[in-house]
Amino acid sequence: MDLDQLLIVDDFYPDPDALRERALALEYTEPEGLTGFRSPPLHPDGVRERIEETLGRHLEAWERASEPRGANGVFFLAFDEGERAEVPGIHWDEPEDFVTMLVYLTPGLPPDCGTSLWRHRATGLSERPTADDAAALETSVEALEEAIVADAEDRSAWEEIDRIGHVYNRAVFYRAGRLHSATRHHGGALGEGRIYHSFHFALGAPL
């Protein structure tokens, strides 16, 4: 995989139903300063090797599994109804030169419960701002980041440039610095919420 690619792999896990049952039994919390209800990390047997075989690359920085912000193997649970409803905010992940990987684990959701990639209309940016972006726009990186964060939940401020449809047990890979969000969440109860398995890692040498 090249970091400029968007990669979709269907039927990623050999037994997604069993993994979903394990995910539903976990405790979900929203750590202070972070958005999204998340579980402790859970690594199915052989998942790192499965990812490496899929990408044809060794993985690095896997030890981030202990960090709440960038943990490997965390399940996220997101709703669009009830007291835990969440508006999907457009954002980038850190470090921006890592790969973000998601696996959708709620069967039967509409296709528009997947992932969208965005371009910010005011700045023209589709990735986390860089010093080169700031120089070209005659501003600062901090000002660009603040503009993106301010517009994160205002869809009128964005142009959708790619959409990955929600398919049960579909894995999606993209560069962490790309501006992205859930297209939308779903439901208000545990069994109908949008559950996905999230990983963040660096790419190493080819296998």
Image (cartoon, helix red, strand yellow):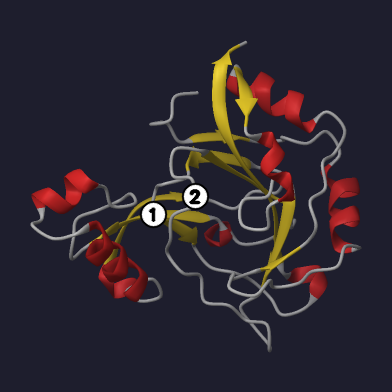
Question: Residue drawn at (60%, 17%), measured in percent from left and top?
Answer: 56
Q: Nearer the viewer, residue 149 or 131?
A: 131
Question: Which quarter of the rendered picture does the C terminus lie within?
Answer: top right
Quarter location, residue 76: bottom right
Residue that carries the numbered disc 1 in the rendered image:
179
- Graded by Cα atoms within 10 Å as few (under 14), some (14 to 19) or many (20 or more), the crowding at tag 2 reads some
Q: Amino acid at mark 1?
A: Leu
Q: Amino acid at mark 2?
A: Glu
Q: Nearer the viewer, residue 7 or 60?
A: 60
Question: Residue drawn at (29%, 65%), measured in percent from left and top?
Answer: 158
Q: Answer with left or right where residue 64 lies relative to residue 162.
A: right
Give the image location of residue 102, x and y in percent. 62, 46
Marks 2 and 1, the one that precedes in the sequence:
2
Q: Nearer the viewer, residue 184 or 22?
A: 22
Q: Nearer the viewer, residue 143 or 207?
A: 143
Q: Answer with left or right where residue 83 lies relative to residue 39.
A: left
Q: Residue furthest bottom?
A: 83
Residue that carries the numbered disc 2 in the rendered image:
94
Whether residue 47 is situated above or below residue 158 in the rendered picture: above
Question: Residue drawn at (68%, 35%), measured in percent from left and top?
Answer: 62
Give the image location of residue 197, x and y in percent. 71, 50
Per the model, the C-alpha gap separating discs 2 and 1 is 11 Å
Question: Residue drawn at (82%, 48%), measured in percent from left and top?
Answer: 42
- Graded by Cα atoms within 10 Å as few (under 14), some (14 to 19) or many (20 or more), the crowding at tag 1 reads many
Whether residue 162 is situated above or below residue 144 in the rendered picture: above
